[in-house]
Image (tube, grey):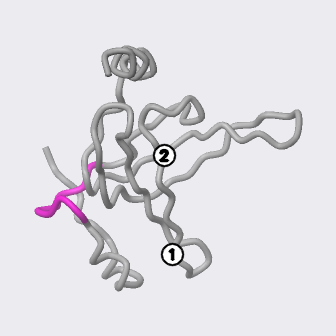
Amino acid sequence: MDALKTIAASSIKAEKPQFEIGDTVRVSVNIREGERERIQMFEGTVIAKRGSGVAETFTVRRLSYGVGVERVFPVNSPNVVDVKVVRRGKVRRSKLYYLRGRVGKAAKVKEQIK
């Protein structure tokens, strides 16, 4: 078991991205197409965070041409190059699954004013 823990500890990123549920983030993802590599952006609202350690993930949701698109990203994946916070959200829930049933302005999260 200790060998698994040491392998897991070595694969955790030194600097974890700092964001919360409800934040609008821009995730830079490394995409491999054959032998070529490129970085693709995915911008949306963080609706869930789960797990801990190596298995920690977060779910980002956005509307694309009127269709809701969700992607689950592992925090410690080498393919997740960068996570930038575009705006902070003011929410009172740990999971924002209720946004799935909403469209348009009803699916917006209020901005947190500091």
Query: Magenta stretch mostly in which secondary structure?
Result: loop
**Of residues 60 and 53, which is closer to you in this image?**
53
Q: Earlier in the sequence, mark 1 or mark 2?
A: 2
x then y, percent, for residue 32: 77, 39
Residue that mark 2 sits on: 26
| Residue type of the residue flagged with mark 2 | Arg
Image mark count:
2
Judging depth in this view, the residue of 30 and 106 nearest the camera is 30
Residue at (66, 44) in percent of width and height: 40
Q: Nearer the viewer, residue 18 or 105?
A: 18
Question: Residue 80 in the image: x percent, y percent?
Answer: 54, 36
Q: Which residues are magenta?
A: 88-95
Which quadrant of the figure contains the C terminus?
top left
Left-right relation of 41 to 94: right
Q: Which mark is residue 2?
A: none
Q: Secondary structure at mark 2?
A: strand
49 left or right, relative to 34: left
Q: Which of the pair 33/24 is nearer the observer?
A: 33
Neighbour class for label 2 at 10 Å: few (<14), some, many (≥20)? many
- The residue identified by callout 1 is 68
Identity of the residue drawn at 32% across and 22% down: 1
